[in-house]
Image (spheres, grey):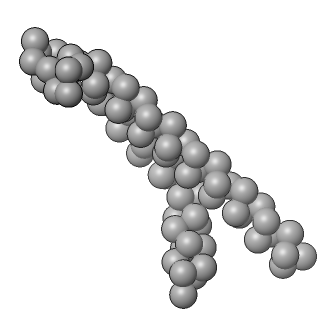
Amino acid sequence: MRSDLKAKFFKRLHLNESWVIFFVLGIIMMNYPFINIFNKPSQLFGLPLFYLYLYLGWLVSIFIIYLFVKAIDHGDSNKGEHH
């Protein structure tokens, strides 16, 4: 069951629409309204909120790219099994 769920997840990530949605979301998150929300003099865990927002956004972006790459690898390995 777990491998079925994993296969469905990776198949869903392989869609071109997912790439476009995450790209647009990344562009939106790095533009005026969101940048202005987090550009405050307050701190969280001793770090300025703005820097924390940028670094967490960067890490999440890297993780999403990692998931896309795994989805592509998973799709390529499934194609090799069926032929």
- Using the image, determine if residue 11 lies above or below residue 68: below
Residue at image location 48% in from the left, 52% down from the top: 18
Residue at image location 58% in from the left, 50% down from the top: 68
* The quarter of the displayed image where residue 21 is located: top left
* The quarter of the displayed image where residue 27 is located: top left
Residue at image location 58% in from the left, 64% down from the top: 10
x, y percent for residue 37: 13, 23
x, y percent for residue 63: 50, 43
x, y percent for residue 35: 22, 20
Residue furthest toward the front? 46
Q: Nearer the viewer, residue 38 or 83?
A: 38
- Using the image, determine if residue 83 lies above or below residue 46: below
Q: How many marks?
A: 0
Indicate left or right for 15 with 31 as reference: right
Indicate left or right for 76 with 44 as reference: right
- Using the image, determine if residue 15 lies above or below residue 25: below
Indicate left or right for 22 with 70 as reference: left
Q: Nearer the viewer, residue 39 or 68?
A: 39
- Using the image, determine if residue 82 lies above or below residue 55: below
Query: Is residue 24 something one can see in this rendering?
Result: no
Query: Is residue 22 something one can see in this rendering?
Result: yes
Indicate left or right for 83 with 38 as reference: right
Residue furthest toward the right? 83
- Quarter of the rendering occupied by the C terminus: bottom right
x, y percent for residue 75: 71, 63
Q: Nearer the viewer, residue 27 or 45?
A: 45
Residue furthest toward the bottom? 1
- Quarter of the rendering occupied by the N terminus: bottom right
